[in-house]
Amino acid sequence: TWQHGVLMASKVMASDGSAFYSKFDKAGRPSGPGGYTFTNGSYVKGHSAAPPIDAEEGDEAPPPPPPSVWYGSAVGVAEATQDGLMKRDYCAVKPIVNIVIAGAPASGKGTQCEKIVEMLELVHISTGDMLRKAAEDESDELGQKAKEHMEAGELVPDDLIIGLVANELNKPECKERGWLLDGFPRTEAQAKEMEKLFLVPTKAILLEVPDDVLVERVTGRRLDPDTGKIYHMKFSPPEGDDAEEIKARLTQRADDTEEALRTRLKGFAANKAALQASFTKIIKTIDGNRSPDKVWEDIKKFLSQ
């Protein structure tokens, strides 16, 4: 098994028909336990290593290491299925999963992203956060070009966004852990550019919530300017002795009006169509008009397939 040009696990055959099964580190050395099967029908599992050395105080140099000692099971009789068992135990490498997720405003995407990252330990990349961070970094050439467009109230051109996304996805931690890309691609053209750069997701998730439900979720949100806390007048209103005092100072953000949301939903409709066309074979549409736990059950099942 290879990942990014590095041997991660292998079954190594000897000329006499015996075999060694193990995972390997980046230097090509066996890492952790392994297993051997022999031509006489027997096998062993474990690892070979030198026992620890207790150096005497004042020694100028450590003594030479003693011969390696076998740590593991005694010799057993190999079964007909032993090759498959050895591969399962010592050569199976957790695949790297790369995910694209999309959902309209208030679809619950943020909650599900947190759960996905927690389960798979992926690097979460939100294109909105990425753009803001790049724009703040004066040493980031692409970020500064994007900043010029943002300050002028213009859309950031595809070539700049794709360049920034590619820079993020090609970082070592993304290659080693996998990534969760949130908010990109938005068009078929962007998806094709990703493919040209070999930045292809293995799974795509689309959260589907009826527009009327989204309107109710968004227009009911209120901001407490004193604490920064977000309430919802129907689903999570202020409670306690000071509830009325809090309600009196709550404000509605400009983006949380129905008119603003309807405009954003038109843009998302085009985004949704592009994702469905670009990732036909790997996309899963999830009903987001349920409790977060129910939505997560379906996402987890899809990611485990």
Image (cartoon, rainbow, N blue to C red):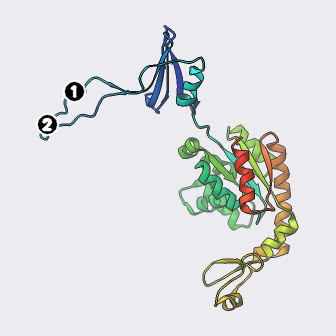
User: Would you identify the image quadrant in which residue 33 lies?
Assistant: top left
The image's mark for residue 156 is none
Left-right relation of 267 to 20: right
Mark 2 and mark 1 lie on one chain; the one further toward the N terminus is: 2
Q: Locate the N terminus by quadrant.
A: top right
Left-right relation of 24 to 124: left
Residue 244 can be seen, yes or no? yes
Q: Locate the C terminus by quadrant.
A: top right
Left-right relation of 141 to 206: left
The image's mark for residue 59 is 2
Q: Nearer the viewer, residue 182 or 129?
A: 182
Give the vertical position of 143 relative to 217 (above or below). above
Please, which residue is most extreme toward the top here? 16
| Image spot of residue 236 (x, y percent) | 72, 77
- Name which residue type carries label 2: Asp
User: Would you identify the image quadrant in which residue 73 lies?
Assistant: top left
Q: Residue, x 71% and y 88% (percent of image)?
A: 247
Q: Residue, x 12% and y 40% (percent of image)?
A: 58
Residue 126 can be seen, yes or no? no
Q: Nearer the viewer, residue 14 or 99?
A: 14
Q: Residue, x 58% and y 29% (percent of image)?
A: 88
| SS at circle 1 | loop
The image's mark for residue 64 is 1
- Name which residue type carries label 1: Pro
- Estimate the spatial distance between the alpha carbons at disc 2 and disc 1, rounded to whole Å: 12 Å
| Image spot of residue 98 (x, y percent) | 66, 44
| Image spot of residue 76 (x, y percent) | 47, 20
Give the vertical position of 60 relative to 264 (above or below). above
- Binning the other alpha carbons within 10 Å of mark 1 as few (below 14), some (14 to 19) or many (20 upward) gives few
| Image spot of residue 241 (x, y percent) | 64, 90
| SS at circle 2 | loop
Q: Residue, x 81% and y 62% (percent of image)?
A: 289
